Image: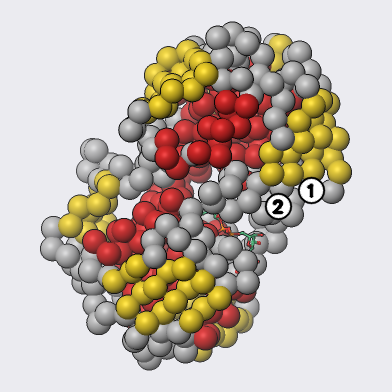
Amino acid sequence: MDKLIITGGTQLSGELRIAGAKNAALPILAATLLSEEAVSVGNIPHLHDITTTMQLLGQMGVRLTIDEKMNIRVDSNETNKFEAPYELVKTMRASILVLGPLLTRFGQAHVSLPGGCAIGTRPVDIHLDSLIKMGAEIKVDAGYIHAKASRLKGCRLVLDKVTVTGTENLLMTAVLAKGTTVIENAAKEPEVSDLAHFLNAMGAKISGIDSDVLVIEGVEKIGKKDLHYTIVPDRIETGTYLVAAAITRGQIKVKDTRPDTLDAVLDKLKEAGADITTGEDWINLDMHGKQPKAVNIRTAPYPAFPTDMQAQFTAMNSVADGVGTITETVFENRFMHVQEMQRMGANIQLESNTAICKGQQQLIGAPVMATDLRASASLVLAGLVAKGETLVDRIYHIDRGYDHIEEKLAQLGATIKRIAR
Ligand code: EPZ
């Protein structure tokens, strides 16, 4: 398994281009199952989860071609298998996103239940209960969801919890359902809005985008000849590299990004002492060599502080001036990175769903193990400021969500290399 070796101590500085958002690309690729016309999608990030999604669609009979600029052309008219097998779903829970499109366009879907994962049980009960309300027949048997429906009917859905992929699954399903669907307590993440804009570009009738009430007028079919759609930039990749510069007291300019999708994160970086300027598609952060100040974080659904940035700020608080608290309200077990950071000398106490971080002047490099996507990235960030060498194992987690992280950090001056062992 590949590992990353980082030698800490360099102040990062330089410019970086941000890739398309993983969590927009996944639902948008699933949504191509709905289209009667081939469609081209651009600014797709070069990530393992994208490869998995292409395999998932390909084994259904969907035709995909990818060009050198990472534009993917998808034609789902030959789809002849309506299954998401366990072998693929176990490596990527977001495979659940094909459930709604398969059911609403082809009348059937057989999708392996995504197992739990390191950060929590992550049930899909809201997805399934809502589909049943729309008229689906759903049976769960031997680890698979078997769903069938003649024509789903639009209705009012009030979601018990704010769920990103739950909102996305139901949004895609409603597009071809008969009549009007209203989704209340919908997730408002920018990736949900990007999916809604993509669906409307293909001829769907969705209103209330960016709000927590989505109204969808069902149509017979969708598909627009020669449509090309460009994915929104990745706000979590953006935030991760901004923290990489902040934690090393350096400077960075991130380009091809969307500052307006990161208000809560930028506010906290300013509170930590970062000097931040922004343009329409760029953000410049400069610490002027100063140690970051400790900040208090409470994660919650968008537009509040994103849970996917929690681990990165835990790393930054570990070397900040003062005591900072990090409260995780979205997932029940998203502090696996804490014990790894403690092995690097971080002074963090866990009390229920809050991490109390007493900032240290320095961490000590150590061999650490990645457990989930964002926790792994936070261990790399900790390695950037630790004294000596940090070896991060199981970095396949990182490759799922970050495109060549070691090359991008090296471009900013970090001493980091990938070893295959
Ligand atoms: C999406 O996961 C993201 N993944 C996650 O990013 C992100 O952390 C999460 O949203 C929260 O923002 C993708 O978009 C592919 P949820 P998702 O459904 O949709 C509970 C990353 O790092 N819930 O919004 O699976 C659930 O247990 C990944 O890129 C139910 O109870 O998350 C959780 O406590 C990690 N029943 C809460 O809702 C359901 O049916 C929010 O989960 C669905 C969810």
Residue name at image x 42 percent, y 69 percent: 214
Residue name at image x 73 percent, y 39 percent: 326
Q: Which residue is mark 1?
A: 353
Q: Is residue 65 left or right of residue 262?
A: left
Ligand 1 visible in quadrant:
bottom right
Q: Quadrant of the C terminus?
A: top right
* Residues at marks 2 and 1 touching, judged by CB atoms closer than 8 Å: yes
| Quarter of the image where one finds residue 32 | bottom left
Foreground residue, 201 or 362? 201
Q: Looking at the picture, which amino acid does disc 1 mark?
A: Asn
* Sooner in the amino-acid sequence: mark 2 or mark 1: 2
Foreground residue, 228 or 376? 228
Residue name at image x 48 percent, y 73 percent: 183
Ligand 1 within 8 Å of the CB at mark 2: no
Binning the other alpha carbons within 10 Å of mark 2 as few (below 14), some (14 to 19) or many (20 upward) gives some
Q: Can residue 389 be seen by looking at this rendering?
A: no
Binning the other alpha carbons within 10 Å of mark 1 as few (below 14), some (14 to 19) or many (20 upward) gives some
Residue name at image x 66 percent, y 37 percent: 311
